[in-house]
Amino acid sequence: MPHTIEIVVAPEHRENEGLIREQAARTLGMAPHNIQHVDIQRASLDARSRYPVYRLRADVYTNDEQFSPEAPILDGFSPVTGQKGTVIIVGAGPAGYFAALELIELGIKPIVIDRGKDARARRRDLRAIQQFGEVHPHSNYCFGEGGAGTYSDGKLYTRSLKRGVVQKSLRLLVEHGAKSDILTEAHPHIGSNKLPGVVQNIRESIVKYGGEVHFDQYVTDFILDNREMKGVVTQYVGTETDQPATQEWRADAVILATGHSARDIYHLCHQKGITIEAKPFALGVRVEHPQSIVDAVQYKQTPRSEHLPAASYSLVCQIRERGVFSFCMCPGGLVVPAATAPGEIVVNGMSMSRRDSPFANSGVVTSIEPEDTAPWAKHGVFAHLEFQAEVERAMFSFGDGSQKAPALRLTDFIAGKMSTTLPDSSYIPGLVPAPLYELLPPFIYKRLRDGLAQFGKMMRGYYTAEANVIGTESRTSAPVRIPRDPATYQHIHIQRLFPCGEGAGYAGGIISAAMDGQNVARAVAVRLL
Protein backbone atom coordinates (compact mmCIF):
# COMPACT_ATOMS: atom_id res chain seq x y z
CA MET A 1 0.00 0.00 0.00
CA PRO A 2 1.27 3.50 -0.78
CA HIS A 3 1.92 6.06 1.93
CA THR A 4 -0.52 9.00 1.78
CA ILE A 5 1.09 12.26 2.86
CA GLU A 6 0.69 16.03 2.50
CA ILE A 7 3.43 18.08 0.88
CA VAL A 8 3.60 21.87 1.00
CA VAL A 9 5.44 23.70 -1.79
CA ALA A 10 5.80 27.29 -2.94
CA PRO A 11 3.91 28.17 -6.15
CA GLU A 12 7.14 28.34 -8.16
CA HIS A 13 7.86 24.70 -7.25
CA ARG A 14 4.41 23.29 -8.05
CA GLU A 15 5.73 21.40 -11.09
CA ASN A 16 9.20 20.59 -9.68
CA GLU A 17 9.07 16.78 -9.53
CA GLY A 18 12.55 16.48 -8.04
CA LEU A 19 11.82 18.82 -5.17
CA ILE A 20 8.45 17.13 -4.52
CA ARG A 21 10.21 13.76 -4.38
CA GLU A 22 12.72 15.17 -1.88
CA GLN A 23 9.89 16.58 0.24
CA ALA A 24 8.14 13.20 0.20
CA ALA A 25 11.33 11.40 1.18
CA ARG A 26 11.95 13.84 4.04
CA THR A 27 8.39 13.37 5.31
CA LEU A 28 8.75 9.58 5.24
CA GLY A 29 12.28 9.60 6.66
CA MET A 30 13.94 7.87 3.72
CA ALA A 31 16.34 8.66 0.88
CA PRO A 32 14.82 9.98 -2.37
CA HIS A 33 16.23 7.03 -4.36
CA ASN A 34 14.04 4.68 -2.32
CA ILE A 35 10.91 6.29 -3.77
CA GLN A 36 9.59 4.76 -6.98
CA HIS A 37 6.74 7.20 -7.69
CA VAL A 38 4.90 10.15 -6.17
CA ASP A 39 1.28 10.14 -7.35
CA ILE A 40 -0.37 13.53 -6.71
CA GLN A 41 -4.01 12.99 -5.79
CA ARG A 42 -5.06 16.57 -5.07
CA ALA A 43 -3.50 20.03 -5.31
CA SER A 44 -5.05 23.09 -3.71
CA LEU A 45 -3.77 26.65 -3.48
CA ASP A 46 -3.77 28.00 0.08
CA ALA A 47 -3.65 31.81 0.01
CA ARG A 48 -4.76 32.42 3.59
CA SER A 49 -1.32 33.57 4.74
CA ARG A 50 0.86 36.33 3.31
CA TYR A 51 2.81 33.80 1.26
CA PRO A 52 0.53 31.47 -0.74
CA VAL A 53 1.48 27.80 -0.96
CA TYR A 54 0.23 24.69 -2.70
CA ARG A 55 -0.90 21.83 -0.50
CA LEU A 56 -0.45 18.51 -2.27
CA ARG A 57 -1.99 15.24 -1.13
CA ALA A 58 0.10 12.44 -2.58
CA ASP A 59 0.35 8.66 -2.58
CA VAL A 60 4.01 7.72 -2.32
CA TYR A 61 5.20 4.36 -3.65
CA THR A 62 8.53 3.04 -2.42
CA ASN A 63 10.74 0.66 -4.39
CA ASP A 64 9.07 -2.24 -2.55
CA GLU A 65 5.60 -1.25 -3.77
CA GLN A 66 4.17 -1.60 -7.26
CA PHE A 67 2.71 1.46 -8.97
CA SER A 68 0.52 0.65 -11.95
CA PRO A 69 -1.17 3.48 -13.88
CA GLU A 70 -4.83 2.91 -14.66
CA ALA A 71 -5.54 1.71 -18.19
CA PRO A 72 -7.39 4.21 -20.40
CA ILE A 73 -11.17 3.89 -20.15
CA LEU A 74 -11.46 3.91 -23.93
CA ASP A 75 -9.38 0.71 -24.07
CA GLY A 76 -12.48 -1.10 -22.83
CA PHE A 77 -14.71 0.17 -25.63
CA SER A 78 -15.92 -2.01 -28.51
CA PRO A 79 -17.97 -0.99 -31.56
CA VAL A 80 -21.75 -1.08 -31.08
CA THR A 81 -24.19 -2.22 -33.76
CA GLY A 82 -27.60 -1.70 -32.20
CA GLN A 83 -28.12 -5.38 -31.45
CA LYS A 84 -28.43 -4.63 -27.73
CA GLY A 85 -30.60 -1.60 -28.35
CA THR A 86 -30.57 1.92 -29.75
CA VAL A 87 -31.11 5.10 -27.76
CA ILE A 88 -31.85 8.61 -29.04
CA ILE A 89 -30.10 11.35 -27.06
CA VAL A 90 -31.51 14.85 -27.57
CA GLY A 91 -28.70 17.30 -26.85
CA ALA A 92 -24.95 17.21 -27.48
CA GLY A 93 -23.91 18.87 -24.23
CA PRO A 94 -21.96 17.15 -21.42
CA ALA A 95 -25.01 15.18 -20.25
CA GLY A 96 -25.75 13.94 -23.76
CA TYR A 97 -22.18 13.17 -24.81
CA PHE A 98 -21.24 11.40 -21.57
CA ALA A 99 -24.47 9.42 -21.72
CA ALA A 100 -23.46 8.38 -25.25
CA LEU A 101 -20.00 7.25 -24.11
CA GLU A 102 -21.51 5.27 -21.23
CA LEU A 103 -24.02 3.58 -23.54
CA ILE A 104 -21.24 2.55 -25.91
CA GLU A 105 -19.29 1.08 -23.00
CA LEU A 106 -22.43 -0.91 -22.14
CA GLY A 107 -22.86 -2.12 -25.72
CA ILE A 108 -25.84 0.08 -26.66
CA LYS A 109 -25.89 2.32 -29.73
CA PRO A 110 -26.46 6.05 -29.12
CA ILE A 111 -27.89 8.43 -31.71
CA VAL A 112 -27.19 12.01 -30.61
CA ILE A 113 -29.20 14.79 -32.23
CA ASP A 114 -28.71 18.50 -31.55
CA ARG A 115 -30.47 21.59 -32.84
CA GLY A 116 -27.17 23.50 -33.00
CA LYS A 117 -24.00 23.19 -35.02
CA ASP A 118 -20.75 21.39 -34.40
CA ALA A 119 -18.17 23.27 -32.31
CA ARG A 120 -16.22 24.58 -35.29
CA ALA A 121 -19.23 25.88 -37.27
CA ARG A 122 -20.77 27.28 -34.10
CA ARG A 123 -17.98 29.86 -33.81
CA ARG A 124 -19.33 31.86 -36.76
CA ASP A 125 -22.61 32.39 -34.95
CA LEU A 126 -20.81 33.39 -31.76
CA ARG A 127 -18.95 36.02 -33.76
CA ALA A 128 -22.26 37.26 -35.17
CA ILE A 129 -23.75 37.82 -31.72
CA GLN A 130 -20.54 39.41 -30.40
CA GLN A 131 -19.81 41.70 -33.33
CA PHE A 132 -23.21 42.40 -34.87
CA GLY A 133 -25.78 41.58 -32.18
CA GLU A 134 -27.34 38.85 -34.33
CA VAL A 135 -28.78 36.00 -32.24
CA HIS A 136 -29.13 32.67 -34.03
CA PRO A 137 -32.01 30.81 -32.32
CA HIS A 138 -30.36 27.41 -32.80
CA SER A 139 -26.65 28.23 -32.59
CA ASN A 140 -25.35 30.52 -29.84
CA TYR A 141 -23.53 30.42 -26.50
CA CYS A 142 -26.14 27.98 -25.12
CA PHE A 143 -27.10 25.85 -28.14
CA GLY A 144 -24.69 23.71 -30.15
CA GLU A 145 -22.08 21.02 -29.65
CA GLY A 146 -20.86 20.94 -26.06
CA GLY A 147 -23.77 23.02 -24.81
CA ALA A 148 -23.40 26.16 -22.69
CA GLY A 149 -20.36 24.74 -20.90
CA THR A 150 -18.20 24.80 -24.04
CA TYR A 151 -17.99 28.57 -23.85
CA SER A 152 -18.29 29.03 -20.11
CA ASP A 153 -14.69 28.50 -19.03
CA GLY A 154 -14.86 24.74 -18.74
CA LYS A 155 -15.01 24.84 -14.93
CA LEU A 156 -15.11 21.28 -13.64
CA TYR A 157 -15.72 21.76 -9.94
CA THR A 158 -18.78 20.04 -8.52
CA ARG A 159 -20.25 19.23 -5.12
CA SER A 160 -22.34 16.42 -6.63
CA LEU A 161 -20.01 13.70 -5.38
CA LYS A 162 -22.87 11.38 -4.42
CA ARG A 163 -24.25 11.31 -7.96
CA GLY A 164 -21.41 9.37 -9.51
CA VAL A 165 -17.70 8.90 -9.78
CA VAL A 166 -16.20 12.29 -10.63
CA GLN A 167 -12.85 10.78 -11.54
CA LYS A 168 -14.28 8.78 -14.42
CA SER A 169 -15.67 11.93 -16.05
CA LEU A 170 -12.37 13.75 -15.57
CA ARG A 171 -10.35 10.84 -16.95
CA LEU A 172 -12.52 10.73 -20.06
CA LEU A 173 -11.91 14.44 -20.59
CA VAL A 174 -8.15 13.85 -20.30
CA GLU A 175 -8.34 10.94 -22.74
CA HIS A 176 -10.00 13.33 -25.17
CA GLY A 177 -7.39 16.06 -24.92
CA ALA A 178 -7.77 17.94 -21.64
CA LYS A 179 -4.65 18.51 -19.55
CA SER A 180 -4.01 15.85 -16.93
CA ASP A 181 -3.84 18.44 -14.13
CA ILE A 182 -7.66 18.48 -14.03
CA LEU A 183 -7.36 15.11 -12.26
CA THR A 184 -5.67 16.70 -9.25
CA GLU A 185 -6.51 20.40 -9.07
CA ALA A 186 -9.04 21.33 -6.38
CA HIS A 187 -10.84 23.67 -8.80
CA PRO A 188 -9.98 22.36 -12.27
CA HIS A 189 -10.89 24.04 -15.51
CA ILE A 190 -10.09 23.52 -19.18
CA GLY A 191 -10.71 26.91 -20.77
CA SER A 192 -13.10 28.02 -23.50
CA ASN A 193 -10.30 27.96 -26.09
CA LYS A 194 -9.43 24.32 -25.34
CA LEU A 195 -12.80 22.77 -24.58
CA PRO A 196 -14.19 22.87 -28.16
CA GLY A 197 -11.36 20.58 -29.27
CA VAL A 198 -12.04 18.19 -26.39
CA VAL A 199 -15.73 18.13 -27.28
CA GLN A 200 -14.98 17.39 -30.93
CA ASN A 201 -12.71 14.51 -29.87
CA ILE A 202 -15.54 13.05 -27.78
CA ARG A 203 -17.80 13.18 -30.83
CA GLU A 204 -15.14 11.37 -32.88
CA SER A 205 -15.02 8.62 -30.25
CA ILE A 206 -18.80 8.25 -30.31
CA VAL A 207 -18.76 7.86 -34.09
CA LYS A 208 -15.65 5.65 -34.10
CA TYR A 209 -17.37 3.10 -31.87
CA GLY A 210 -20.61 2.97 -33.85
CA GLY A 211 -22.68 5.82 -32.42
CA GLU A 212 -24.16 8.63 -34.50
CA VAL A 213 -24.13 12.41 -34.05
CA HIS A 214 -26.41 14.69 -36.08
CA PHE A 215 -26.46 18.50 -35.95
CA ASP A 216 -29.02 21.08 -37.13
CA GLN A 217 -31.83 18.76 -36.03
CA TYR A 218 -34.45 20.72 -34.11
CA VAL A 219 -36.96 18.58 -32.19
CA THR A 220 -40.51 19.60 -33.04
CA ASP A 221 -42.50 16.62 -31.78
CA PHE A 222 -42.35 13.50 -29.64
CA ILE A 223 -43.57 10.13 -30.89
CA LEU A 224 -45.71 8.67 -28.11
CA ASP A 225 -47.73 5.47 -28.03
CA ASN A 226 -49.72 4.39 -24.99
CA ARG A 227 -47.58 6.52 -22.62
CA GLU A 228 -44.35 5.17 -24.06
CA MET A 229 -41.73 7.29 -25.82
CA LYS A 230 -40.99 5.80 -29.22
CA GLY A 231 -38.89 8.57 -30.75
CA VAL A 232 -38.82 12.19 -31.89
CA VAL A 233 -39.54 14.27 -34.98
CA THR A 234 -37.02 16.88 -36.08
CA GLN A 235 -36.92 19.78 -38.49
CA TYR A 236 -33.64 20.34 -40.32
CA VAL A 237 -32.41 23.89 -39.66
CA GLY A 238 -29.06 23.72 -41.44
CA THR A 239 -28.04 24.84 -44.92
CA GLU A 240 -27.34 21.54 -46.71
CA THR A 241 -29.83 21.08 -49.54
CA ASP A 242 -29.80 17.27 -49.53
CA GLN A 243 -31.22 16.92 -46.01
CA PRO A 244 -34.91 16.04 -45.52
CA ALA A 245 -36.93 18.95 -44.13
CA THR A 246 -38.45 16.75 -41.41
CA GLN A 247 -37.40 13.38 -40.12
CA GLU A 248 -38.64 10.74 -37.69
CA TRP A 249 -36.13 9.11 -35.32
CA ARG A 250 -37.23 5.94 -33.55
CA ALA A 251 -35.37 3.99 -30.90
CA ASP A 252 -35.79 1.82 -27.81
CA ALA A 253 -35.52 4.82 -25.46
CA VAL A 254 -35.04 8.59 -25.50
CA ILE A 255 -32.68 10.53 -23.22
CA LEU A 256 -33.75 14.18 -23.06
CA ALA A 257 -30.61 16.21 -22.33
CA THR A 258 -31.41 19.57 -23.88
CA GLY A 259 -29.85 22.05 -21.42
CA HIS A 260 -31.30 24.81 -19.26
CA SER A 261 -32.34 27.20 -22.06
CA ALA A 262 -34.45 24.95 -24.32
CA ARG A 263 -37.72 26.68 -23.48
CA ASP A 264 -39.47 25.26 -26.53
CA ILE A 265 -38.83 21.71 -25.28
CA TYR A 266 -40.60 22.52 -22.02
CA HIS A 267 -43.59 23.85 -23.96
CA LEU A 268 -43.55 20.76 -26.20
CA CYS A 269 -43.58 18.51 -23.15
CA HIS A 270 -46.55 20.41 -21.77
CA GLN A 271 -48.43 20.19 -25.08
CA LYS A 272 -47.87 16.43 -25.26
CA GLY A 273 -49.08 15.82 -21.71
CA ILE A 274 -45.59 15.08 -20.36
CA THR A 275 -45.55 16.29 -16.77
CA ILE A 276 -43.20 19.17 -15.95
CA GLU A 277 -43.02 21.43 -12.91
CA ALA A 278 -41.65 24.82 -11.92
CA LYS A 279 -38.52 24.75 -9.78
CA PRO A 280 -36.53 27.36 -7.87
CA PHE A 281 -33.67 28.98 -9.75
CA ALA A 282 -31.50 32.08 -9.35
CA LEU A 283 -31.31 35.40 -11.15
CA GLY A 284 -29.20 38.52 -10.83
CA VAL A 285 -26.32 40.35 -12.49
CA ARG A 286 -22.72 39.80 -13.52
CA VAL A 287 -20.11 41.83 -11.66
CA GLU A 288 -16.80 42.58 -13.39
CA HIS A 289 -13.71 43.86 -11.57
CA PRO A 290 -10.19 44.54 -12.80
CA GLN A 291 -8.33 41.29 -12.11
CA SER A 292 -5.59 43.27 -10.36
CA ILE A 293 -8.03 44.27 -7.62
CA VAL A 294 -9.07 40.68 -6.94
CA ASP A 295 -5.41 39.56 -7.00
CA ALA A 296 -4.37 42.24 -4.51
CA VAL A 297 -7.20 41.31 -2.14
CA GLN A 298 -6.73 37.55 -2.29
CA TYR A 299 -2.95 37.29 -2.52
CA LYS A 300 -2.03 40.38 -0.51
CA GLN A 301 0.56 41.30 -3.13
CA THR A 302 0.72 43.68 -6.10
CA PRO A 303 1.43 42.71 -8.77
CA ARG A 304 0.56 39.04 -8.60
CA SER A 305 3.49 36.63 -8.79
CA GLU A 306 3.93 35.05 -12.21
CA HIS A 307 3.68 31.66 -10.51
CA LEU A 308 0.19 32.30 -9.15
CA PRO A 309 -3.03 31.86 -11.14
CA ALA A 310 -5.52 34.69 -11.50
CA ALA A 311 -7.27 34.93 -8.13
CA SER A 312 -10.93 34.07 -7.66
CA TYR A 313 -13.48 34.47 -4.90
CA SER A 314 -16.63 32.85 -3.57
CA LEU A 315 -19.05 34.96 -1.55
CA VAL A 316 -22.44 34.30 0.00
CA CYS A 317 -24.67 36.05 2.50
CA GLN A 318 -28.26 36.01 3.71
CA ILE A 319 -30.49 39.00 2.98
CA ARG A 320 -33.94 38.84 4.57
CA GLU A 321 -33.74 35.05 4.79
CA ARG A 322 -32.76 34.65 1.14
CA GLY A 323 -29.36 33.82 -0.23
CA VAL A 324 -27.28 36.18 -2.36
CA PHE A 325 -24.22 34.47 -3.76
CA SER A 326 -21.48 34.62 -6.35
CA PHE A 327 -21.85 32.13 -9.18
CA CYS A 328 -19.66 30.89 -12.04
CA MET A 329 -16.67 33.05 -11.09
CA CYS A 330 -14.32 33.59 -14.05
CA PRO A 331 -10.87 34.89 -13.04
CA GLY A 332 -8.94 36.39 -15.93
CA GLY A 333 -12.16 36.07 -17.93
CA LEU A 334 -14.61 37.66 -20.31
CA VAL A 335 -18.29 38.59 -20.11
CA VAL A 336 -20.19 37.25 -23.13
CA PRO A 337 -23.72 37.60 -24.59
CA ALA A 338 -25.71 34.43 -23.92
CA ALA A 339 -29.15 35.25 -25.36
CA THR A 340 -30.87 32.40 -27.18
CA ALA A 341 -33.46 34.47 -29.03
CA PRO A 342 -33.76 38.00 -30.40
CA GLY A 343 -35.18 40.60 -28.04
CA GLU A 344 -33.43 39.55 -24.83
CA ILE A 345 -30.22 40.42 -22.98
CA VAL A 346 -28.50 37.58 -21.13
CA VAL A 347 -24.86 37.62 -20.05
CA ASN A 348 -22.50 34.89 -18.91
CA GLY A 349 -18.81 34.55 -18.12
CA MET A 350 -15.97 32.53 -19.59
CA SER A 351 -12.19 32.25 -19.37
CA MET A 352 -9.52 30.97 -21.68
CA SER A 353 -7.17 28.25 -20.43
CA ARG A 354 -4.52 30.75 -19.32
CA ARG A 355 -7.03 33.03 -17.61
CA ASP A 356 -4.98 36.00 -18.73
CA SER A 357 -7.67 38.62 -19.34
CA PRO A 358 -7.21 41.81 -17.25
CA PHE A 359 -10.75 41.34 -15.92
CA ALA A 360 -12.45 39.06 -13.39
CA ASN A 361 -16.19 38.47 -13.48
CA SER A 362 -18.77 36.54 -11.53
CA GLY A 363 -22.49 36.17 -11.46
CA VAL A 364 -24.09 37.58 -8.33
CA VAL A 365 -27.56 36.14 -8.00
CA THR A 366 -30.38 35.54 -5.58
CA SER A 367 -32.69 32.57 -5.30
CA ILE A 368 -36.17 32.81 -6.83
CA GLU A 369 -38.88 30.87 -5.00
CA PRO A 370 -42.58 30.36 -5.87
CA GLU A 371 -43.72 33.15 -3.56
CA ASP A 372 -41.48 35.58 -5.48
CA THR A 373 -43.28 34.91 -8.74
CA ALA A 374 -46.87 34.99 -7.42
CA PRO A 375 -47.86 37.67 -10.00
CA TRP A 376 -46.85 35.21 -12.73
CA ALA A 377 -48.88 32.33 -11.22
CA LYS A 378 -51.34 32.56 -14.13
CA HIS A 379 -48.65 30.90 -16.25
CA GLY A 380 -48.83 27.75 -14.11
CA VAL A 381 -45.75 25.55 -14.43
CA PHE A 382 -44.18 28.25 -16.60
CA ALA A 383 -44.39 30.96 -13.93
CA HIS A 384 -40.64 30.99 -13.27
CA LEU A 385 -39.78 30.68 -16.94
CA GLU A 386 -42.01 33.61 -17.90
CA PHE A 387 -40.62 35.69 -15.04
CA GLN A 388 -37.08 34.94 -16.25
CA ALA A 389 -37.97 35.85 -19.83
CA GLU A 390 -39.68 39.09 -18.80
CA VAL A 391 -36.57 40.32 -16.97
CA GLU A 392 -34.42 39.51 -20.02
CA ARG A 393 -36.79 41.40 -22.32
CA ALA A 394 -36.80 44.41 -19.98
CA MET A 395 -33.00 44.57 -20.22
CA PHE A 396 -33.20 44.49 -24.02
CA SER A 397 -35.95 47.10 -24.22
CA PHE A 398 -33.71 49.73 -22.66
CA GLY A 399 -31.06 49.42 -25.37
CA ASP A 400 -30.82 50.24 -29.06
CA GLY A 401 -31.82 46.83 -30.38
CA SER A 402 -28.29 45.45 -30.25
CA GLN A 403 -26.65 43.21 -27.65
CA LYS A 404 -25.24 46.17 -25.70
CA ALA A 405 -25.84 45.33 -22.07
CA PRO A 406 -27.24 47.69 -19.42
CA ALA A 407 -24.74 48.40 -16.65
CA LEU A 408 -23.80 50.59 -13.70
CA ARG A 409 -20.70 51.14 -11.65
CA LEU A 410 -20.89 48.94 -8.57
CA THR A 411 -20.97 51.95 -6.26
CA ASP A 412 -23.81 53.53 -8.23
CA PHE A 413 -25.77 50.27 -8.33
CA ILE A 414 -25.66 50.12 -4.53
CA ALA A 415 -26.54 53.83 -4.24
CA GLY A 416 -29.42 53.47 -6.72
CA LYS A 417 -28.26 56.18 -9.11
CA MET A 418 -27.19 56.44 -12.74
CA SER A 419 -23.57 56.25 -13.82
CA THR A 420 -22.40 58.97 -16.19
CA THR A 421 -19.52 56.80 -17.41
CA LEU A 422 -18.57 53.14 -17.09
CA PRO A 423 -15.18 51.48 -16.52
CA ASP A 424 -13.54 49.45 -19.27
CA SER A 425 -15.09 46.02 -19.79
CA SER A 426 -14.33 42.75 -21.56
CA TYR A 427 -17.89 42.65 -22.96
CA ILE A 428 -17.39 43.02 -26.72
CA PRO A 429 -20.89 44.22 -27.74
CA GLY A 430 -20.43 47.09 -25.29
CA LEU A 431 -22.11 48.44 -22.16
CA VAL A 432 -24.59 51.29 -21.78
CA PRO A 433 -25.37 53.12 -18.51
CA ALA A 434 -28.86 52.04 -17.47
CA PRO A 435 -31.09 52.23 -14.37
CA LEU A 436 -30.73 48.61 -13.30
CA TYR A 437 -32.46 49.56 -10.05
CA GLU A 438 -35.59 50.07 -12.17
CA LEU A 439 -35.09 47.38 -14.81
CA LEU A 440 -34.75 44.64 -12.20
CA PRO A 441 -37.84 43.67 -10.19
CA PRO A 442 -37.71 45.65 -6.92
CA PHE A 443 -37.31 42.63 -4.64
CA ILE A 444 -34.36 41.36 -6.69
CA TYR A 445 -32.67 44.77 -6.85
CA LYS A 446 -32.98 45.30 -3.08
CA ARG A 447 -31.54 41.86 -2.29
CA LEU A 448 -28.65 42.31 -4.71
CA ARG A 449 -27.98 45.85 -3.51
CA ASP A 450 -27.78 44.77 0.13
CA GLY A 451 -25.89 41.59 -0.75
CA LEU A 452 -23.25 43.45 -2.76
CA ALA A 453 -22.86 45.97 0.06
CA GLN A 454 -22.30 43.03 2.41
CA PHE A 455 -19.74 41.53 0.01
CA GLY A 456 -17.86 44.83 0.21
CA LYS A 457 -17.52 44.31 3.97
CA MET A 458 -16.56 40.66 3.62
CA MET A 459 -13.89 41.21 0.94
CA ARG A 460 -11.93 44.44 1.37
CA GLY A 461 -11.53 46.14 -2.00
CA TYR A 462 -14.59 44.49 -3.58
CA TYR A 463 -16.66 47.67 -3.20
CA THR A 464 -15.18 49.95 -5.85
CA ALA A 465 -16.27 52.33 -8.58
CA GLU A 466 -13.93 50.45 -10.94
CA ALA A 467 -16.31 47.47 -11.07
CA ASN A 468 -19.24 47.11 -13.48
CA VAL A 469 -22.60 45.57 -12.60
CA ILE A 470 -24.05 44.14 -15.82
CA GLY A 471 -27.58 42.86 -16.48
CA THR A 472 -28.66 40.20 -16.56
CA GLU A 473 -27.36 36.87 -15.24
CA SER A 474 -30.48 34.76 -15.62
CA ARG A 475 -29.49 31.33 -16.96
CA THR A 476 -27.93 29.94 -13.80
CA SER A 477 -30.13 26.85 -13.97
CA ALA A 478 -33.38 25.65 -15.45
CA PRO A 479 -36.55 27.25 -14.01
CA VAL A 480 -38.41 24.03 -14.87
CA ARG A 481 -37.91 20.40 -13.87
CA ILE A 482 -38.97 17.32 -15.82
CA PRO A 483 -39.72 14.90 -12.97
CA ARG A 484 -38.37 11.37 -13.03
CA ASP A 485 -38.46 8.30 -10.81
CA PRO A 486 -35.37 8.44 -8.56
CA ALA A 487 -34.91 4.67 -8.81
CA THR A 488 -35.29 4.15 -12.56
CA TYR A 489 -34.46 7.67 -13.89
CA GLN A 490 -37.49 7.36 -16.18
CA HIS A 491 -40.10 10.10 -16.39
CA ILE A 492 -42.69 9.58 -13.69
CA HIS A 493 -45.46 8.94 -16.23
CA ILE A 494 -43.83 8.25 -19.61
CA GLN A 495 -42.02 4.96 -20.10
CA ARG A 496 -38.69 4.94 -21.99
CA LEU A 497 -38.28 8.71 -21.57
CA PHE A 498 -35.24 9.59 -19.47
CA PRO A 499 -34.93 13.29 -18.49
CA CYS A 500 -31.29 14.17 -17.94
CA GLY A 501 -28.86 16.94 -17.01
CA GLU A 502 -29.33 20.65 -16.40
CA GLY A 503 -32.33 21.06 -18.68
CA ALA A 504 -34.28 18.43 -16.77
CA GLY A 505 -33.33 20.05 -13.46
CA TYR A 506 -30.83 17.45 -12.22
CA ALA A 507 -27.41 19.04 -12.65
CA GLY A 508 -25.62 22.35 -12.27
CA GLY A 509 -22.43 22.33 -14.30
CA ILE A 510 -20.28 20.34 -16.70
CA ILE A 511 -19.26 17.55 -14.35
CA SER A 512 -22.58 17.13 -12.56
CA ALA A 513 -24.27 17.02 -15.98
CA ALA A 514 -21.73 14.49 -17.26
CA MET A 515 -22.25 12.27 -14.21
CA ASP A 516 -26.01 12.51 -14.57
CA GLY A 517 -25.64 11.44 -18.18
CA GLN A 518 -23.61 8.43 -17.10
CA ASN A 519 -26.13 7.50 -14.40
CA VAL A 520 -29.06 7.82 -16.79
CA ALA A 521 -27.26 5.72 -19.40
CA ARG A 522 -26.79 2.94 -16.87
CA ALA A 523 -30.48 3.15 -15.96
CA VAL A 524 -31.38 2.87 -19.65
CA ALA A 525 -29.19 -0.23 -19.90
CA VAL A 526 -31.04 -1.83 -16.98
CA ARG A 527 -34.29 -1.23 -18.87
CA LEU A 528 -33.03 -2.55 -22.21
CA LEU A 529 -30.64 -5.38 -21.38
Image (cartoon, rainbow, N blue to C red):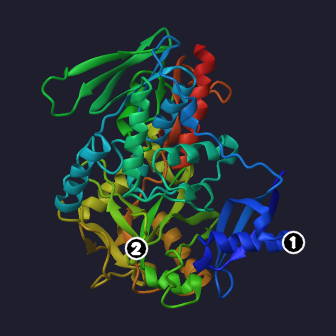
Q: Which residue type does callout 2 highlight? A: Asp
CA gap between label 2 and label 1 equals 40 Å
Q: Where is residue 460, by image quadrant?
A: bottom right
Q: At 26% from the left edge and 33% from the top edge, which residue is drawn?
A: 216
Please state the horizontal and vertical placement of residue 42, each as a whole percent of the image.
Answer: 68, 61
Q: Residue furthest left?
A: 241
The quarter holding residue 127 reads bottom left
Residue furthest bottom in the image: 302
| Quarter of the image that includes the C terminus | top right
Picture coordinates of residue 283, whole percent (x, y): 47, 58
For mark 1, does the 10 Å Cα neighbourhood hold few (<14), some (14 to 19), or many (20 or more) residues? few
**Mark 2 Cα within 10 Å, few/some/many (few <14, many 20+)?**
some
**Residue drawn at the location 84% of the way across and 50% of the way down:** 1
Tag of residue 356: 2
Q: Would you say residue 504 is visible in this rendering?
A: no
Work out whether 192 lies above or below 527. Answer: below
Question: Percent position (x, y) of residue 242?
Answer: 15, 23
Mark 2 vs mark 1: which is more N-terminal?
A: 1
The residue under label 1 is 29
In the displayed structure, would residue 100 be above or below residue 456? above
Q: Hey, what amino acid is under mark 1?
A: Gly
Q: Nearer the viewer, residue 5 or 24?
A: 24
Can residue 107 be seen by looking at this rendering?
yes
Mark 2 lies on a secondary structure that is loop
Between 457 and 209, the one lying in front of the other is 209
The residue under the point 83% across, 53% down is: 64
Marks counted in the figure total: 2
Image position of 510 (left or right of 271)? right
Question: Which disc number belongs to residue 83?
Answer: none
Q: Nearer the viewer, residue 277 or 508?
A: 508
Q: Residue furthest front?
A: 33
Local secondary structure at mark 1: loop
